[in-house]
Image (tube, grey):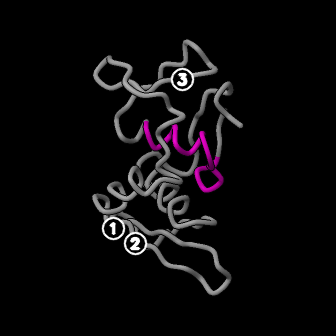
Amino acid sequence: MKIKTDTLTGLSLNLVVALCEGHDIDIEDITDPWLVLDGIAFEPISKYKPSTDWAHGGPIIEREGIRLHRSHTGDWWAGSESDPHRPISGPTPLIAAMRCYVTSHLGDEVDIPEELTP
């Protein structure tokens, strides 16, 4: 299923960030998909939350040089060093930053298994 990156949230956003980070996803058991790295399943996707947990999203923001700005309306905007003229918005700094990260790596739309969409 194709989804616009600037609308991703929750599990879908975290899943796509994991893919950008080089993980595969084992969806053999759709109720409990796992992150896979180098062929080894090591963590349930439900525990990987870069869009809500600074311990996961913060290092990506720092490594990628993502800049954050809060607008006068309260929305957050994130811009990447690789594409500074194309900021992406979100309701929180982490959601904006992870949407920006995904957009800079995969473009404006991504394919997500329908089983993993909210």
Residue 62 spot, x, y in % from top left: 31, 63
Dominant secondary structure of the magenta stretch? helix
| Image position of 88 with respect to 39: above or below | below
Identify the residue position indicated by label 1 in the image: 81
Q: Earlier in the sequence, mark 1 or mark 3?
A: 3
For the point 50% across and 49% down, the residue is: 107
For the point 55% across and 12% down, the residue is: 28
Q: Earlier in the sequence, mark 3 or mark 2?
A: 3
Residue at disc 1, secondary structure: loop
Q: Residues within 10 Å of mark 1 (few under 14, many from 20)?
A: few
Identify the residue position indicated by label 2 in the image: 67
Residue 33: image tag: 3
Residues at discs 1 and 3 in contact (Cβ within 8 Å): no
The range drawn in magenta is 4-18
Q: Is residue 13 magenta?
A: yes
Q: Residues within 10 Å of mark 3 (few under 14, many from 20)?
A: some
Q: Nearer the viewer, mark 1 or mark 2?
A: 2
- The amino acid type found where label 3 is placed reads Pro
Residue at disc 3, secondary structure: loop
- The amino acid type found where label 2 is placed reads Arg
For the point 62% across and 19% down, the residue is: 30
- Marks 1/3: CA–CA distance: 32 Å
Residue 51 spot, x, y in % from top left: 52, 52
For the point 48% across and 28% down, the residue is: 44
Q: Residues within 10 Å of mark 2 (few under 14, many from 20)?
A: some
